[in-house]
Amino acid sequence: MRKNIVILGSTGSIGKNTLSVLRKDKINFQIKLLSTNGNVAKIIQQAKEFKVKNIIINDQKKFLNAKKKYKKLNIKIHNSFSILDKILSKHKIYYGMISIIGLDGLKPTLKLIEYSQNIAVVNKESLICGWGLITKKLKKFKTNFIPIDSEHFSISEIIKYKKIDTIEKIYITASGGPFLDYSNSKLLNVSVKDALKHPNWRMGKKISIDSATMMNKVFEVIEAKNIFNINYKKISILIHPKSYIHALIKFNNGQIKILAHDPDMKIPIHNSIYYNISKKITSKNLNLNILNNLDFRKINHNKFPTIKILNSLPNINSLYETALVTINDYFVKKFLENKINFLTLIRSICRYSNHSNFTKLKKIPIKNINDIYKTREYVSLKLDILGI
């Protein structure tokens, strides 16, 4: 019997990589549902190729146009994740992939957990802001969570069958992004196009900018703390420009274990789909040139001041994480719209992450999903008032 799969965010880089893995094994999998924000042409192409009967298009205008344009196709086009209950049966689907960008991905994440045997979540905002809500759902519906980010996938592989209290230190690696060796004076004149040129990974615009500012590593440390239930003091970041080693872990028995793979997201995706199953994937030969020159470096906090945000994060899951995500989203959007320069982007994130209007949220725990969305609205309104 073919195993049912759902991919929310199928037209983004992770979604396309997931389909690339599944393309080689169509006989064993059936895709039940795909979604996109507004890339209609791509999702229709995907639905035709994989014979998917249901798709979701979130953008209202594009949804209405698609309903009209593709009405003769044997594809049901929906406009809301609220349809998940009707599309998915009460039986577990084998695998659900959440690769939606932004906090709007939290509600569908929580809903898809109810129907999934295995859930893979690449939506950073959900893992950062709503982890407490996610864990409750995972336990209630006995759903297996599989981290997909290369760093967290690597950590989970290294610590399999190990107790958390045997870990002395987790090191997450960072490429340093496109501006690793730039001076501050040179950063003043970089363009959006420059910031989007990641040296190793092909990613969407938002995550590419986060890589350039190093906010992606701030978020990945928060994710690691949540996913593996480990104190911030036991997590550090190392610069590794080659992006070949994704995590190092030092255990209290003296052992240091590392996990290496090419900077190709199909590798963690493949291993998440074939969870606990030995399934071959075609990959490159061992790169001895990289292994003989790993080039690990400590982070220069003056060069990447956003990393300093980690020094004052609360160990409880609070509403502050939602504030931090919202602050970052707010200024990244302004940078992508060419309304601020790159140095102003970094300075604004650092300044407002330490603003009293938002740091007070560190003491407020999350009760429900509405708390998160109300906090996002509150922070956005405050930033509009405070200005840059």
Image (cartoon, rainbow, N blue to C red):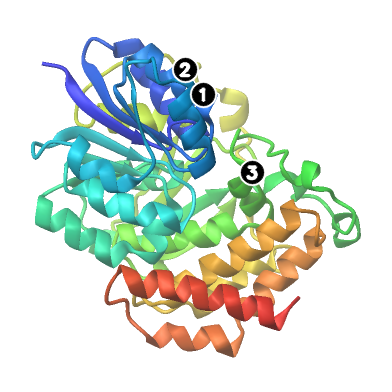
Vertical comparison of 73 with 354: above or below: above
Residue 58 spot, x, y in % from top left: 45, 43
Query: Residue 42: which numbered mark, if any?
Result: 1
Residue 348 spot, x, y in % from top left: 71, 72
Query: Residue 205: which numbered mark, if any?
Result: 3
Pointer 2 with pointer 1, Cβ within 8 A: yes
Task: Report how far apart the C-alphas of labels 2 and 1 lie in the structure.
Answer: 5 Å
Residue 101 spot, x, y in % from top left: 49, 48
Identity, as a three-letter code, of the amino acid under mark 3: Lys
Residue that appears at 69% across and 83% down: 386
Identity, as a three-letter code, of the amino acid under mark 2: Gln
Front one among 178 and 234? 178
Say whether residue 122 is left or right of residue 165.
right
Task: Report how far apart the C-alphas of labels 1 and 3 lie in the structure.
Answer: 18 Å
Q: Quadrant of the N terminus?
A: top left
Mark 1 and mark 3 lie on one chain; the one further toward the N terminus is 1
Residue that appears at 28% across and 48% down: 82
Identity, as a three-letter code, of the amino acid under mark 1: Lys
Front one among 90 and 319? 90
Pointer 2 with pointer 3, Cβ within 8 A: no
Task: Report how far apart the C-alphas of labels 2 and 3 lie in the structure.
Answer: 23 Å
| Residue at which label 2 appears | 45
Residue that appears at 53% across and 49% down: 173
Question: Is disc 2 placed on a helix, strand or loop?
Answer: helix
Q: Residues within 10 Å of mark 2 (few under 14, many from 20)?
A: few
Say whether residue 303 is left or right of residue 73.
right
Q: Quadrant of the C terminus?
A: bottom right
Say whether residue 6 is left or right of residue 17.
left
Pointer 1 with pointer 3, Cβ within 8 A: no
Vertical comparison of 286 with 380: above or below: above
